[in-house]
Image (cartoon, grey):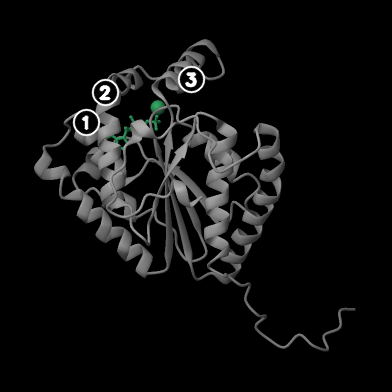
């Protein structure tokens, strides 16, 4: 787990991190699938405690290129959670109203409240990704955002939110396969947008932008994990492990009943 966490201020060379890696795990796909079920059960138990305690909050940020598996991670890792306490949402290009505010305005409105777990499919990090790579705003605008993001996430952490951020790292070849699959499979065609090809054409610029944000915004209280994501089973296993281990270490307990229940008889 630790080997995939980005240390604050440390340089990241994504070219040296193999997206097909399964380092730290000895087994293969079948072993991973066997391990996954008990992990998922532990996640469900923690989520129920989080909701019952109704105090702390959890924010999970998923970033990655198109087809990196953000949707798949959500549907797989969070399967079975109680929808009462869990919300997942996807951030698209901002609307004119959103653009008329600061970039964190729409994000702050969606962070978890007490007892909630919220999963972001894309996030405020888009504001230093396409905005930078496609030059939607000049450097004077996006450069200060690293500090602004760190301050924002510190505010979240200091007010009871556990923030975990995952970069789903796939290779350019793997993206080609997955995009082709979206074109070929009628059930997946709805996901294909020609705009994705524009982002793909800027692959190297995106990798550079990711390296920069990983270095600048991985904080002790809001760490980034680089998740090798060519193999979906490994991606799911790693994300689930980080989540479960981190949340279990918080020691969230279910509250005591409000009154003394001794001696109560139900007829
Ligand atoms: P998808 O997640 O594939 O459905 O696509 C959502 C699109 O919205 C992606 O192309 C994102 O890059 C884009 N997007 C999300 N947030 C922003 C943002 N703050 N600025 C510009 N584009 C964004
Ligand atoms: Mg897309």
The answer to whether the residues at label 1 and label 2 have Cβ atoms under 8 Å apart is yes
Between 133 and 99, the one nearer to me in the picture: 133
State how far apart marks 3 and 1 are (Cα): 22 Å
Percent across and percent down for residue 256 are 65, 80
Image quadrant containing the C terminus: bottom right
Mark positioned earlier in the residue sequence (3 or 1):
1
Q: Which residue is mark 1?
A: 133
Q: Residues within 10 Å of mark 1 (few under 14, many from 20)?
A: some
Assess disc 2: are there few (<14), some (14-19) or many (≥20) residues with their C-alpha within 10 Å of its C-alpha: few
Say the numbered circle drawn on residue 191: none
Q: Earlier in the sequence, mark 3 or mark 2?
A: 3
Q: Which residue is mark 2?
A: 202
Element class at badge 2? loop
Label 3 belongs to which residue? 178
Which one is nearer the viewer's eye here, 26 or 226? 26
Q: Is residue 45 above or below residue 35?
A: below
Q: Earlier in the sequence, mark 1 or mark 2?
A: 1
> Is the CB of the residue bearing disc 1 within 8 angstroms of ligand 1?
no
């Amino acid at each position: 787990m630790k080997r995939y966490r980005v240390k604050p201020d440390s340089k990241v060379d994504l070219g040296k991190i193999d997206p097909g890696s399964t380092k730290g795990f000895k087994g293969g796909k079948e072993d991973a699938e066997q391990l996954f079920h008990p992990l998922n059960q532990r996640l469900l138990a923690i989520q129920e405690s989080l909701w019952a305690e109704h105090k702390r909050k959890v924010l999970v940020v998923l970033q990655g290129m198109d087809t990196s598996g953000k949707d798949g991670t959500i549907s797989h890792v969070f399967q079975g959670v109680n929808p009462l306490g869990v919300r997942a949402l996807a951030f698209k290009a901002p609307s004119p109203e959103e653009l008329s505010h600061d970039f964190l305005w729409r994000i702050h409105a969606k962070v978890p409240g007490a007892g909630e777990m919220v999963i972001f499919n894309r996030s405020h990090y888009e504001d230093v990704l396409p905005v930078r790579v496609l030059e939607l705003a000049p450097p004077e605008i996006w450069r200060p955002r690293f500090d602004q993001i760190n301050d924002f996430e510190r505010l979240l952490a200091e007010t009871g939110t556990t923030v975990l951020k995952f970069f789903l790292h796939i290779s350019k070849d793997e993206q080609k396969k997955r995009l082709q699959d979206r074109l070929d499979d009628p059930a997946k065609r709805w996901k294909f947008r020609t705009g994705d090809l524009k982002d793909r054409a800027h692959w190297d610029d995106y990798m550079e932008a990711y390296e920069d944000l990983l270095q600048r915004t991985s904080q002790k209280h809001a760490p980034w994990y680089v998740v090798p994501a060519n193999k979906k089973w490994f991606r799911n296993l790693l994300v689930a492990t980080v989540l479960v281990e981190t949340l279990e270490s918080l020691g969230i307990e279910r509250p005591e009943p409000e009154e003394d229940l001794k001696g109560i008889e139900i007829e």
